[in-house]
Image (cartoon, rainbow, N blue to C red):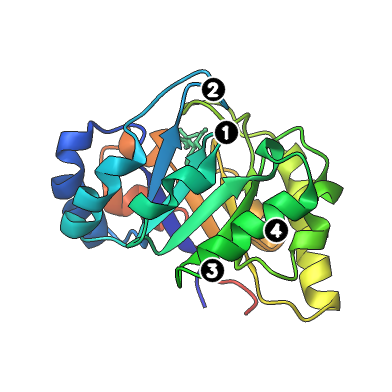
Amino acid sequence: MENRVAISTLPFKFEELQEKSRILKEAGTDFLHCDIMDGKFVKNSTFMPDKLEKLAATSELPLDVHLMVVEPTKYLKFCKMAHSISIHCEVFKTLTECRTAIESIKNLGIKAGVAIDLHTPAKNVIQLLQIVDLVLVMSVKAGSGGQKFDALALEKIKLYDSIREEKSLNFEIEVDGGINGDNAQKCIQVGANILVSGSYVANSANFATSINSLKYQTDD
Ligand code: DX5
Ligand code: ZN
């Protein structure tokens, strides 16, 4: 089996996403990774989830929503057509609050992901691995595209992969930030299943070639 590739919305204008999703799908993309920033959890702001309904209706790709917002549950009503929604563990005061938010995503019939920022300790989400469908491991500091991949993320991927194995869990591991043709294979080798790319693919001369350079055989 091959890993999947999700392309970030960040490098594109909202108005061009419908057309881009068609082109990206033809080029071998599996998901449209919708980066949503509220200017509070991270300093930048992007289009807000109320636009996701329109995008979902026109996108040729399933939406992999990444909520970088302080109150993610406020936005779930706009994400009903998403394939998956990942919320940041850092915005919750307690594990119970985060767990409740994850359950509310699952109750919508949507794959629920917990996102963990680059410098957040890996242990902070371990107890959630039993209930999530996805763990989104940031390999850059959340908040902007075009940053350099930080190998610190590999330690988290390895740890979560070993816990998945040990406890026969079936969550997926998605890696997000600075992914390119040089670090993709290493992420897959240590257990990642989905790679997110923004600038590496968006700035490439040929989407199919650059996306293909991010695909490798995985164990499963
Ligand atoms: C950063 C976003 C990432 C980013 C990926 O906060 O969550 O999805 O846009 O873009 P690159 O691949 O350019 O790091
Ligand atoms: Zn993202």
Q: CA distance from mark 3 to mark 2?
A: 25 Å
- Describe the element under mark 3 as helix, strand or loop: helix
Tell me the amino acid under the disc marked 2.
Answer: Lys
Q: CA distance from mark 1 to mark 4?
A: 15 Å
Q: Is mark 3 within 8 Å of ligand 2?
A: no
Q: Marks 2 and 1: CB-CB under 8 Å? A: yes
Q: CA distance from mark 2 to mark 1?
A: 7 Å
x, y percent for residue 63: 35, 57
The residue that appears at 41% across and 23% down in the rendered structure is 45
Tell me the amino acid under the disc marked 4.
Answer: Arg
Tell me the amino acid under the disc marked 3.
Answer: Lys
- Describe the element under mark 2 as helix, strand or loop: loop
Q: Quadrant of residue 172?
A: bottom right
Please give the residue where the numbered disc 4 appears in the rendered image.
Answer: 99
Give the number of the disc on residue 106.
3
Q: Quadrant of residue 60?
A: bottom left
